[in-house]
Image (spheres, helix red, strand yellow):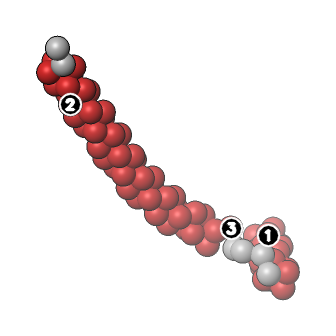
Amino acid sequence: MRRNEASGIRASIQERRAVLGLANPVEKISELKKDTERYYRLILRYFVFLDRELERKAEMKLSGEKMKSRRDGRLP
């Protein structure tokens, strides 16, 4: 009898949540896992982008310093 009561309570809670437009907790967890995986991919892409930008800026700075040292070396 207790199982039936618990089952009835769970069913009424799910029905109430559906009426109120609230997400099913099991579905919500599944969606969160999918979102987390998608966010990890986006974060990884962003880190790769930042790494390339930093590398590009470092190369530009290094080439600028080389040009400056060449100019300074040519001056009397």
Percent coordinates x, y for residue 20 in the rendering: 85, 81
Tell whether 50 sits left or right of 13: left
Q: Considering depth in this image, is 4 or 22 the residue closer to the camera?
A: 22
Image disc number at residue 6: 1
Label whose residue precedes the other's in the sequence (1 or 2): 1
In the picture as drawn, the residue positioned furthest to the top comes out as: 76
> Residue beneath label 2, please?
67
User: Split into 4 quadrants, where in the image is the N terminus?
Assistant: bottom right
Percent coordinates x, y for residue 37 in the rendering: 45, 60
> Residue beneath label 3, please?
25
Tell whether 6 sits left or right of 62: right
**Amino acid tagged 2:** Met
Do the residues bearing badges 1 and 3 touch, measured as CB atoms within 8 Å? no
Label whose residue precedes the other's in the sequence (1 or 3): 1
Q: Quadrant of residue 76?
A: top left
Percent coordinates x, y for residue 61 in the rendering: 30, 33
Residue that appears at 49% across and 58% down: 39
